[in-house]
Image (tube, rainbow, N blue to C red):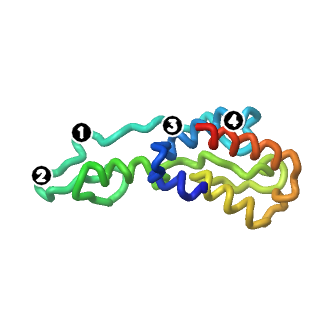
Amino acid sequence: MFLHLDANGCRSGITRHDVNRIVQDADWDDLITFSRRLRPVQGVPKNAYRAGTQRWHCQLCTQRFTTSTGLSAHLASARHAGELYKCPRWDDACRRTFKSLSALVQHMDSAVCGVENDYYVEVNFDGIVDALRSW
């Protein structure tokens, strides 16, 4: 489910940025988010199109796109996002951070740092999942 939501392709119309905002609102004690790092979508810059190459250029990397839609999808992806999420054990044992919710969930499922056995984390994460389902 989380990979699907991070891909910005859900039929419901929910985007990765919507997911980030919903998770931030539901994560009332900043268990898994660096809430101050969440940024709004900025869109395609007006000067991104280069007539000489007939391509839309990402101003943050070297990628080029044949359509503004392709560039827009690239900019809306996690490619240039900061580390928005953290392991729930970030304060005491695990200092891992993640650009996407799906990457955090994969880390939690991997049982690398013992977070999978934490009841407090499970209860709080269930609340976050419920908030996403009610969107």
Residue ID at (53%, 56%): 4
Q: Which residue is mark 2?
A: 51
Disc 4 residue crowd, few under 14, some 14–19, many 20+, Cα 10 Å: some
Mark 4: which secondary structure?
helix
Residue ID at (73%, 38%): 30
Q: Which residue is mark 3?
A: 39
Disc 1 versus disc 3: distance between alpha carbons?
A: 20 Å
Disc 3 residue crowd, few under 14, some 14–19, many 20+, Cα 10 Å: few
Disc 4 versus disc 3: distance between alpha carbons?
A: 17 Å
The residue type indicated by label 3 comes to Arg
Front in this rendered view, residue 97 or 44? 44
Disc 4 versus disc 2: distance between alpha carbons?
A: 44 Å
Residue ID at (80%, 46%): 91
Q: Which mark is residue 46?
A: 1
Disc 2 residue crowd, few under 14, some 14–19, many 20+, Cα 10 Å: few
Q: Which residue is mark 4?
A: 26
Height in image: 31 above or below 57? above
